[in-house]
Amino acid sequence: MSEREHAMSTSDTGRGSDDAYWFVTADERVARLFSCTRTPAGTPHVYEIASIQNGHEMEHERGRPDMLSGGARAPGAGGSPFPHLAAWKDTEAEENRRFAREVSRWLTSESAERKFDRPRIFAASRFLGLLRKEMPDGADLYEAELTRLQPGALAKHPAVKEAFPWRS
């Protein structure tokens, strides 16, 4: 079955006739949507279906004063000579919050388009709290850094295997 055929074969319950389960891996840079089925031999097979990148990272020039950091102020004029450095963490945190909101909207759109319900979401610990605030109630969130793994490695990963009812 091709990835396109696989993606189109799901039902409203999150599982299609091929018993597909949906999950997402996410961190502050990327979120990836996967579908997982069992082969005739009973082993899990993972397909990457879609992904989204954090486009907010490039919105600000790093290391230069900008409007978010209050601009440059002269020493002794009531501020640091390098206010942009102090605001670095605030800017990065805001970018991550924006991306968490974007991931939530993207996942809502993907679930409506592909007709699945409540995918399991594996997120890096540094991004998990932000996703918890943005995801609708009832989202299944797990702490696991899996975004850099390929589909074959995900199929064998203990956290992924443990999250599905037909564990092997």
Image (cartoon, rainbow, N blue to C red):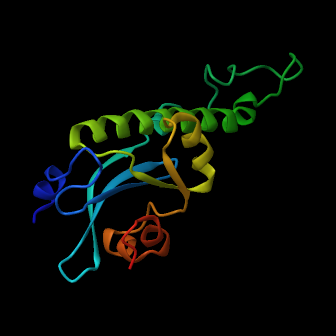
**Position above or below: 98 against 111:** above
Quarter of the image where the C terminus is located: bottom left
Can residue 72 be seen in this snapshot?
yes
Can residue 63 be seen in this snapshot?
no
The residue lying toward the viewer, choosing from 94 and 109, is 109
Q: Quadrant of residue 3?
A: bottom left
Residue 21 spot, x, y in % from top left: 31, 59
Say which residue appears at 30% left-offset and 41% top-offset. 111
Numbered marks: total: 0
Quarter of the image where the N terminus is located: bottom left
The residue lying toward the viewer, choosing from 67 and 167, is 167
Q: Quadrant of residue 129?
A: top right
Residue 25 spot, x, y in % from top left: 43, 56
Residue 156 spot, x, y in % from top left: 39, 77
Say which residue appears at 40% left-offset and 74% top-offset. 167
In this view, the residue farthest toward the top is 77
Q: Is residue 149 left or right of residue 129?
A: left
Residue 29 spot, x, y in % from top left: 47, 48
Say which residue appears at 48% left-offset and 37% top-offset. 99
Say which residue appears at 10% left-offset and 63% top-offset. 2
The residue lying toward the viewer, choosing from 33 and 67, is 33
Q: Is residue 126 left or right of residue 151?
A: right
